[in-house]
Image (cartoon, grey):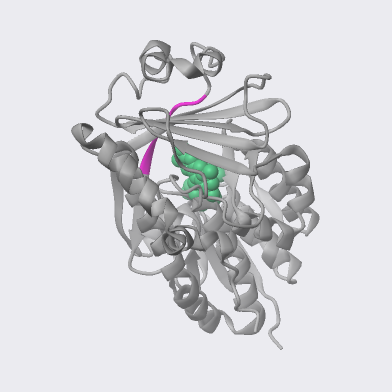
């Protein structure tokens, strides 16, 4: 029988709060250090595949999230000629689109209800493998386990010397929430590729629709979100005038560059990293947060079964290859979408169409959706 211990976590994002809730519910004493003055997320939507939804169910946040989210039954990918080239992404199971702030709030509520202590304005400056977290005020805290859930530029990862590379993929997107109208899809999503640009339209709540506008960093007009360069997007996507006109001239959403984080490992001694700190990836498959939340659940399972060093070994051995695989497929998807040679766009459509026809390829791309951690024994 493993006796639950004490854990100190850096970062109250989706990853930090999910692992916090999981561990608190398994009897751990949990404290989360958040550098910001309050718990908050950005104003955008988020895709929740099956693995994300199962993680939410695991921590008791599923009902609160889906009550405000949009269920998706069909997702169409269209090409530069407005032809549907893929509509089978959703092989099985449930999928929802949520508003990030609502998702974050629901996970935070689950964590707080489970007894997690959250300290805001608490900046972490590093960690030690002996289970110490260092704080900016010069103090330190010790625990049986410390976790860095402090995002792409993780100081915990860097102080443990676990980082290999934070690679800028020279690709990114603007993302916006707009008031929802009858022009927007219901229970369905659209993604349309035009040259090196990708336009996504996803209802995210009864009141809000989520738009993403992806393009390579070199597309200087396309990346201009503040103020929003409406004309350049209307030129390529006149059929989405209604939605593009609902994006404010100076929107809240900023340009988000995509990064791949690679590491030499996910733990050292009694210190571990999770979420974007461990495996930030391009969001093209809508899986980065889902994988992070699933890893949180898996870590909870492992720590209920083994002592801390063994649990961290088994957890990393089991979950890290999954994250690496999703990261790779997501990067390939992004390259096809925004990095494909312009004269060969019809060849791209034919390729996507033929890949889509293969159930084996579909299963490979979608495997994380179906994945459930099984470290509980
Ligand atoms: C454009 C875009 C679209 C996306 N869409 C999807 C999607 O549809 N589905 C999906 O699953 N994923 C998606 N993702 C990925 C997802 O947003 C991230 O994987 C996820 O938010 C990462 O959560 P995190 O908690 O690891 O990191 P973060 O969200 O970065 O949270 C880190 C937290 O730690 C705090 N922090 C940082 N440093 C310190 C410190 N030193 N001390 C204390 N606190 C600190 C920060 O303030 C923050 O609260 C998308 C990403 C992007 C960029």
Magenta segment main secondary structure: strand
- Asked if the stretch drawn in magenta spans residue 257, the answer is yes
Does residue 198 lie above or below 121 as drawn? above
Residue 322 quadrant: bottom left
Q: Nearer the viewer, residue 297 or 137?
A: 297
Residue 180 locus on image (x, y percent):
66, 22
Does residue 248 lie above or below 313 as drawn? above
Left or right of 329? Residue 4 is right
Can the viewer see residue 266 in this picture? no
Q: Nearer the viewer, residue 262 or 323?
A: 323
Q: How many marks?
A: 0
Q: Pick out the residue farthest to the bottom.
A: 1
Residue 377 quadrant: bottom right
Which span of residues is magenta-colored?
253-258
Does residue 42 lie above or below 2 as drawn? above
At 42% from the left edge and 13% from the top edge, which residue is drawn? 230
Residue 324 locus on image (x, y percent):
39, 63
At 63% from the left edge and 66% from the top edge, which residue is drawn? 297
Residue 245 locus on image (x, y percent):
53, 12
Does residue 102 lie above or below 174 as drawn? below
- Asked if the stretch drawn in magenta spans residue 240, the answer is no
Residue 145 quadrant: bottom right
At 55% from the left edge and 80% from the top edge, which residue is drawn? 311
Left or right of 187? Residue 348 is left
Q: Nearer the viewer, residue 61 or 193?
A: 193
Question: Split into 4 quadrants, where in the image is the N terminus?
Answer: bottom right
Left or right of 365? Residue 35 is right
Q: Nearer the viewer, residue 270 or 255?
A: 255
Residue 14 locus on image (x, y percent):
59, 50
Can the viewer see residue 168 in this picture? yes
């Amino acid at each position: 029988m493993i006796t639950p211990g004490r854990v100190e976590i850096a970062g109250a994002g989706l990853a930090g709060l999910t692992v916090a809730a999981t561990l608190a519910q398994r009897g751990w004493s949990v404290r989360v250090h958040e550098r910001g003055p309050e718990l908050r997320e950005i104003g955008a939507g988020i895709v929740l595949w099956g693995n994300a939804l199962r993680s939410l169910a695991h921590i008791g946040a599923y009902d609160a999230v889906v009550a405000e989210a949009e269920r998706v039954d069909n997702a169409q990918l269209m090409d530069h000629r407005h032809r549907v080239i893929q509509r089978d992404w959703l092989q099985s199971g449930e999928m929802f689109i949520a508003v990030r702030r609502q998702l974050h709030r629901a996970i935070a509520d689950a964590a707080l209800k489970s007894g997690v202590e959250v300290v805001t304005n608490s900046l972490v400056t590093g960690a030690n493998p002996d289970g110490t977290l260092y704080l900016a005020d010069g103090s330190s805290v010790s625990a049986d386990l410390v976790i860095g859930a402090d995002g792409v530029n993780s100081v915990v990862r860097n102080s443990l010397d676990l980082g290999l590379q934070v690679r800028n993929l020279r690709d990114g997107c603007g993302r916006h929430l707009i008031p929802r109208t009858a022009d927007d899809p219901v229970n369905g999503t659209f993604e349309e590729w035009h040259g090196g640009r990708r336009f996504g339209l996803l209802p995210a709540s009864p009141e809000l629709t989520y738009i993403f506008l992806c393009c390579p960093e070199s597309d200087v007009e396309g990346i201009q979100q503040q103020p929003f360069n409406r004309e350049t997007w209307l030129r390529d996507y006149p059929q989405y005038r209604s939605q593009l006109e609902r994006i404010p001239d100076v929107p809240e959403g900023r340009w988000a560059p995509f990064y791949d984080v690679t590491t030499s490992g996910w733990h050292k001694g009694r210190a571990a990293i999770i979420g974007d700190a461990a495996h930030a990836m391009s969001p093209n498959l809508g899986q980065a947060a889902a994988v992070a939340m699933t890893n949180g659940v898996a870590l909870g399972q492992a720590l209920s079964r083994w002592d801390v060093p063994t649990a961290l070994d088994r957890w990393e051995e089991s979950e890290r290859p999954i994250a690496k695989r999703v990261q790779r497929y997501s990067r390939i998807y992004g390259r096809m979408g925004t990095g494909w040679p312009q004269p060969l766009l019809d060849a791209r459509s034919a390729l996507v169409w033929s890949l889509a026809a293969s159930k084996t390829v579909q299963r490979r791309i979608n495997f994380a959706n179906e994945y459930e951690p099984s470290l509980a024994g």
